[in-house]
């Protein structure tokens, strides 16, 4: 059952990615990466509840070569504060249009 959930999540995230690429809404910004799909889905859920503007996409291969949930936002502080408060581990990468640069590593939530 978990595999089916992850399959449908992957389809949804890839659809979002292609839509955002075609419409030109995906580019520079802050890319949030999580240590697992389950934690990424939890991050997505709490961000939706908090009504923070972001996009859900598959995590870019330049950040992590396996499957994963990525959240993209034009500013990082709202999501960063929320995930710290909720004790959700994450990393933040900034994409400048050419490359991804790690700007925050909170995989260890004790930091």
Image: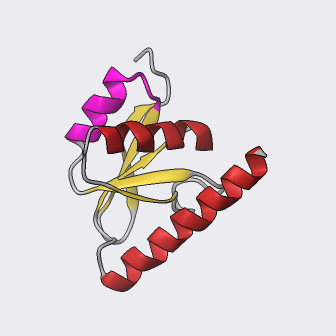
Query: Can you tell which quarter of the image residue 19 is in?
Result: bottom left
Query: Would you say 105 lies left or right of 41 here?
Result: left
Query: Would you say 106 lies left or right of 1 here?
Result: left
Q: Is residue 20 above or below residue 110?
A: below
Residue visible at 27% across and 38% down in the picture? 50
Where residue 106 appears, x then y in whole percent? 42, 29
Query: Can you tell which quarter of the image residue 73 is in?
Result: bottom left
Q: Is residue 64 above or below residue 89?
A: below
Residue 36 visible somewhere in the drawing: no
Residue that extends furthest to the top in the rendered view of this protein = 110
Query: Would you say 52 lies left or right of 95 here?
Result: left
Residue visible at 25% across and 53% down in the picture? 53
Residue 10 visible somewhere in the drawing: yes
Residue visible at 45% across and 20% down in the picture? 109
Residue visible at 34% across and 71% down in the picture? 26
- Camera-side residue of 79 and 105: 79
Where residue 11 appears, x then y in whole percent? 61, 67
Where residue 77 appears, x then y in whole percent? 21, 39
Colour style of the rendered protein structure? secondary structure
Q: Quadrant of the C terminus?
A: top left
Is residue 45 inside the magenta stretch?
no
Query: Can you tell which quarter of the image residue 39 is in?
Result: top right
Magenta residues (range)? 77-89
Is residue 81 inside the magenta stretch?
yes
Give the number of marks: 0
Q: Magenta region's main secondary structure?
A: helix
- Camera-side residue of 99 and 73: 73
- Camera-side residue of 56 and 108: 56
Q: Is residue 45 above or below residue 69?
A: above
């Amino acid at each position: 059952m978990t595999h089916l959930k992850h399959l449908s999540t992957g389809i949804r995230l890839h659809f979002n990615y292609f839509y955002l690429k075609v419409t030109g809404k995906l580019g520079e910004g802050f890319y949030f990466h999580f240590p697992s799909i389950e934690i990424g889905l939890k991050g997505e859920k709490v961000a939706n509840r908090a009504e923070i503007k972001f996009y859900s996409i598959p995590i870019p291969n330049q950040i992590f070569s396996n499957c994963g949930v990525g959240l993209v936002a034009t500013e990082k502080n709202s999501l960063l504060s929320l995930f710290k408060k909720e004790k959700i581990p994450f990393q933040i990468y900034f994409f400048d249009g050419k490359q991804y640069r790690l700007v925050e590593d909170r995989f260890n939530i004790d930091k």
